[in-house]
Image (cartoon, helix red, strand yellow):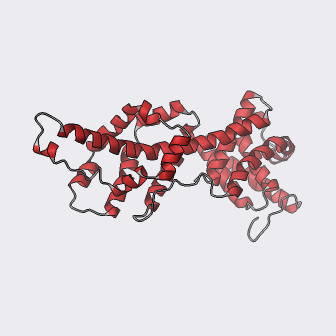
């Protein structure tokens, strides 16, 4: 499921896009923000579906080999451990996966089957596949460990696949690492006696509302924060502050003033991390210093009220 940090990233991207395009259509941009997050779920499903499509391709290869005129003993009595993998078969039989794919018409691997072939070729020539197929162990635990390794070592690092995803949906560039981690967690949580069920996009309704609330409150109130930022950056002209840094500072101030249940230190830490990943080398230190001063000022002047223990 999407976490608060990734929600903040998606909001940051939408605020930046609005600044760059000089648009004022909040309704349109909020819809695109939500659409971008929903499409991230498509990426999650497509990767899980790809695991099964590779298994299906392997099964087809086995059936074709059996029909050879000069079929070998190995062709006629193939090793079907991969085909019988319990976890892959749970995913294949998943009602939630099949339903989502059908409802959203995710036919990517029917249209772009060359990527299924690329992954299959990489898998069967990899040591993890050889060791799995030749292992005498036959357990659910082994099957799951193999599928996790299959995804982490074959699918996730595949550059051609990453290029395809990025070409399909530009916002997936930043979603891929998060989705990869999400898939590994999903696979590790799977149990032998449970059907495979897709993870939820949002943890709860609060997180879902957080998307819209943070975005709209930043856009509607950002100009009110500029004097506070100017006071805490006397040696900096506004034009000298990186665009991303300014957006992150304004988002953090929005959380200070409008999200009473989020501890100020949590807010500061989250935006420091985003600055490290998406702005300049020194942005983390800069944002930490600015937000720390603003938070202290708001606390002293009772502008920032946090509810609960240890929330300042």
Residue 28 location in percent, x, y? 75, 34
Q: Nearer the viewer, residue 63 or 46?
A: 63
Q: Nearer the viewer, residue 18 or 41?
A: 41
**Horizontally, is 275 left or right of 225 in the view?**
left
Judge whether 21 appears above or below 189 on screen: above
Q: Residue at x 63, y 52 (%)?
A: 5
Image quadrant occupied by the C terminus: bottom right
Q: Is residue 241 visible?
A: no
Residue 166 location in percent, x, y? 52, 33
Which residue extends farthest bottom? Answer: 309
Q: Nearer the viewer, residue 103 or 212?
A: 103
**Horizontally, is 17 left or right of 173 in the view?**
right
Q: Is residue 162 visible?
A: yes
Q: Residue at x 23, y 42 (%)?
A: 62
Residue 11 location in percent, x, y? 69, 43
Q: Residue at x 75, y 71 (%)?
A: 309
The quadrant holding residue 262 is: bottom right
**Horizontally, is 231 left or right of 188 in the view?**
right
Residue 55 location in percent, x, y? 33, 45
**Horizontally, is 268 left or right of 44 in the view?**
right
Q: Nearer the viewer, residue 257 or 54?
A: 54
Which residue extends farthest right? Answer: 301
Q: Residue at x 18, y 40 (%)?
A: 66
Number of numbered discs present?
0
């Amino acid at each position: 499921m999407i976490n608060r940090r990734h929600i903040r990233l998606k909001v940051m991207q939408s605020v930046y896009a609005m600044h760059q395009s000089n648009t004022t259509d909040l309704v349109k941009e909020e819809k695109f923000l939500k659409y971008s997050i929903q499409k991230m779920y498509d990426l999650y499903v497509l990767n899980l579906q790809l695991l099964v499509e590779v298994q299906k391709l392997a099964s087809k290869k086995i059936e074709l080999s059996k029909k050879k005129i000069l079929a070998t003993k190995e062709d006629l009595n193939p090793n079907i451990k991969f085909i019988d993998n319990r976890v892959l078969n749970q995913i294949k039989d998943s009602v939630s996966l099949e339903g989502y794919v059908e409802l959203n018409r995710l036919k990517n691997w029917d249209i772009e089957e060359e990527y299924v072939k690329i992954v299959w070729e990489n898998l069967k020539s990899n040591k993890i596949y050889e060791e799995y197929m030749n292992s005498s162990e036959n357990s659910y635990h082994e099957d799951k460990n193999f599928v996790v390794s299959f995804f982490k070592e074959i699918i996730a690092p595949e550059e051609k696949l990453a290029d395809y995803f990025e070409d399909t949906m530009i916002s997936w560039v930043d979603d891929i690492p998060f989705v990869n981690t999400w898939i590994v967690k999903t696979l590790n949580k799977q149990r032998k006696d449970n059907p495979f069920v897709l993870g939820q996009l949002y943890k709860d309704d609060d997180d879902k509302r957080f998307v819209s609330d943070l975005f709209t409150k930043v856009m509607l109130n950002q100009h009110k924060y500029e004097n506070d930022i100017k006071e805490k950056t006397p040696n900096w002209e506004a034009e000298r502050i990186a665009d991303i840094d300014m957006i992150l500072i304004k988002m953090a101030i929005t959380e200070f003033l409008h999200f009473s249940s989020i501890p100020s230190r949590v807010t500061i830490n989250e935006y420091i991390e985003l600055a490290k990943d998406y702005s300049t080398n020194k942005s983390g230190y800069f944002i930490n210093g600015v937000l720390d001063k603003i938070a202290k000022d708001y606390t002293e002047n009772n502008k920032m009220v946090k509810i609960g223990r240890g929330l300042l």
